[in-house]
Image (tube, grey):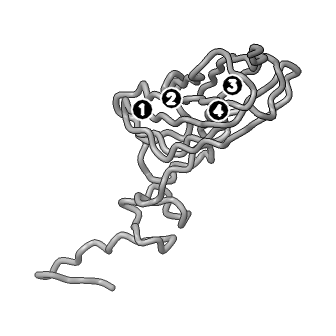
Amino acid sequence: MTVILAGKELPPLPVDLDDDGFDQTADCDDNNVDVNPIMPEIPGNGLDDDCNTATPDELPAGSIECTVVTDKRNYFPHTLVQATITILSNSDDLSILGLEGDLAIVDGDERTVFEEALAVNSLPPNGRYRTTVIFNSQALPVDTYVAAVDINFAAQLACQSDARFDVIKRPPE
């Protein structure tokens, strides 16, 4: 369509090549319907999904740190073990979406005896996420254990932490 106003032809309207509702002036890849300003950034896929260079495809080094702490150093059999996981953002301007990971309890023979998935929907700039996982030590024999946390940003390992604890014999009564 050509518009003529007061004897002057107006330039054509921008074209939306991929029919995603965003023309070439707003869409950073107008040949890919899955890339436009309202799409969430998918970490690790090599695309600027949301057309925002401020949301990185990889997490900059040192952007987050994590810790795991157990509520006690020693547990008797058949008691509850609490492991608190804290994830901190060290970025002043980066909102981090899509962190995933797991807490694994590993025995002295390096066998995983308990595992729970962790998902952090969003971590705002300088934000903190904290969760506590509780499990029963009833199936754990007397041994030294490690509560190990791995947090990932897509395929990238973002941080790790571990805490040691023991399951000990209950003293005679």
Alpha carbon separation for disc pair 1 and 4: 25 Å
Alpha carbon separation for disc pair 3 and 2: 13 Å
Mark 3 highlights which residue?
147
Alpha carbon separation for disc pair 1 and 3: 20 Å
Above or below — where is 70 with respect to 31? above
> Seen in the image, is 4 located left or right of residue 88?
left
- Name which residue lies at 51% across and 70% down: 18
Mark 1 highlights which residue?
128
Mark 4 surroundings: few (<14), some (14-19) or many (≥20) residues within 10 A: some
**Foreground pick, 5 / 158:** 158
Furthest toward the bottom, the residue is 1
* Rendering coords of residue 152 (x, y %): 62, 36
Alpha carbon separation for disc pair 3 and 4: 14 Å
* Rendering coords of residue 100 (x, y %): 60, 41
Mark 2 highlights which residue?
86
User: Which numbered disc flags the more N-terminal residue, 2 or 4?
Assistant: 4
Alpha carbon separation for disc pair 2 and 1: 7 Å
Q: What is the secondary structure assignment of the residue under circle 1?
A: strand
- Name which residue lies at 44% across and 39% down: 123
Mark 4 highlights which residue?
80
